[in-house]
Image: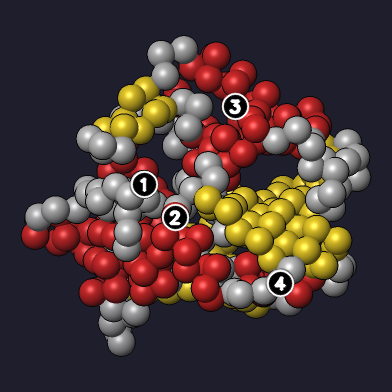
């Protein structure tokens, strides 16, 4: 089903992602240089070839197409029907299967993932954690908060632990989890918290819950990388935030000008932007 005002569930979601999603670069501590996001992901695969890779939140396959060669079989999920339609056409591959699935629904309905030896999710898993704290009515595009935050946290942790317990002990995993306190994300969260405050008024709370859950069911490391998102010009900045980051929240010329003004300090002489961004690279094995 499609919802016009949703950035993930509209008919044009996949088109907008391919048109407007910018490139991210992060400082690599080994090479002492900025590397594109996908190169950092590949370096964390350690040149292994896996039997079955499961990716949660594949989008249109920007990252997926680079990871498929590291597997004998590939399973990709995304909540967006338009994303799955696009990636299925884009990556026609007899060893890759893609399905429309909400991450939490998938975890609840799956009895075993013992065929999977590598689990990954890039930028998407935050939304499955946040879903325990707020519910979205896609028909009205409104958010409904959970009344019991302690219960929501317990349910989120139980869900993550369940996901890891479906895997065999020793299964590798890799998550890219956005830095909610970065310059780029803080503008987004400032706008969003006007609609509904984040749990405990902490925009990075879901990542803390995620790490807490991991500590129960895995051995993992978390490496924070600083970097930037590269924006081509003012139009790209507006298109990116209006169709992806903050769809439905930038509606007037005043909203647009406020966005441009907020990031003006990061605009270069040639009109491009390098807006500070961050990522948490979470890598480990299930217990």
Task: Say what secondary structure mark 1 lies in.
Answer: loop
Q: Quadrant of residue 18?
A: bottom left
Which callout, 3 or 4, points to the residue nearer the camera?
A: 4
Mark 1 vs 3: CB contact within 8 A: no
Task: Say what secondary structure mark 3 lies in.
Answer: helix
Q: Earlier in the sequence, mark 2 or mark 4?
A: 2
Q: Is residue 68 above or below residue 154?
A: below
Task: Give the x, y percent position of residue 62.
Answer: 55, 71
Q: Earlier in the sequence, mark 3 or mark 2?
A: 2
| In the image: residue 188, left or right of residue 224 | left
Q: Is 187 in front, or is 90?
A: 90
The residue located at (72%, 62%) in the rendering is 74
Quarter of the image with the C terminus in it = top right
Task: Give the x, y percent position of residue 205.
Answer: 52, 32
Q: Earlier in the sequence, mark 1 or mark 2?
A: 1
Task: Give the x, y percent position of residue 125.
Answer: 57, 45
Q: Is 127 in front, or is 86?
A: 86
* Dot label at residue 156: 3
Q: Is 44 in front, or is 89?
A: 89
Which callout, 1 or 3, points to the residue nearer the camera?
A: 1
Is disc 1 surrounded by few (<14), some (14 to 19) or many (20+) residues within 10 Å? few
Q: Which residue is mark 2?
A: 81
Structural distance between the alpha carbons of marks 1 and 2: 8 Å
The residue located at (85%, 43%) in the rendering is 114
Q: Which residue is mark 1?
A: 1
The answer to whether residue 71 is visible is: yes
Q: Which residue is mark 4?
A: 94
């Amino acid at each position: 089903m499609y919802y016009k005002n949703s950035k993930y569930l509209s008919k044009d979601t996949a088109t907008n992602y391919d048109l407007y999603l910018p490139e991210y670069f992060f400082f690599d501590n080994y090479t002492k240089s900025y590397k594109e996001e996908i190169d950092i992901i590949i370096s964390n695969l350690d040149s292994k070839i896996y039997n079955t890779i499961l990716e949660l939140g594949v989008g249109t396959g920007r990252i997926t197409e680079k990871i498929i060669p590291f597997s004998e079989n590939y399973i990709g999920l995304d909540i967006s029907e338009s994303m799955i339609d696009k990636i299925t056409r884009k990556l026609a591959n007899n060893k890759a299967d893609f399905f429309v699935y909400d991450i939490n629904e998938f975890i609840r309905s799956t009895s075993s993932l013992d065929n999977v030896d590598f689990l990954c999710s890039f930028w998407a898993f935050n939304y499955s954690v946040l879903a325990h704290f707020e519910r979205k009515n896609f028909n009205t595009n409104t958010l409904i908060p959970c009344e019991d935050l302690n219960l929501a946290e317990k349910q989120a942790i139980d869900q993550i632990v369940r996901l890891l317990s479906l895997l065999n002990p020793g299964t590798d995993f890799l998550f890219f989890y956005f830095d909610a306190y970065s310059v780029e994300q803080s503008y987004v969260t400032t706008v969003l918290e006007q609609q509904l405050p984040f749990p405990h008024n902490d925009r990075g709370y879901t990542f803390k819950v995620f790490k807490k859950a991991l500590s129960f069911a895995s051995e993992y490391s978390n490496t924070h990388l600083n970097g930037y998102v590269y924006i081509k010009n003012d139009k790209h900045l507006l298109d990116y935030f209006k169709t992806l980051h903050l769809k439905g929240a930038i509606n007037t010329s005043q909203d647009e000008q406020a966005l441009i003004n907020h990031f003006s300090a990061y605009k270069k002489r040639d009109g491009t932007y390098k807006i500070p961004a961050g990522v948490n690279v979470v890598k480990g094995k299930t217990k």
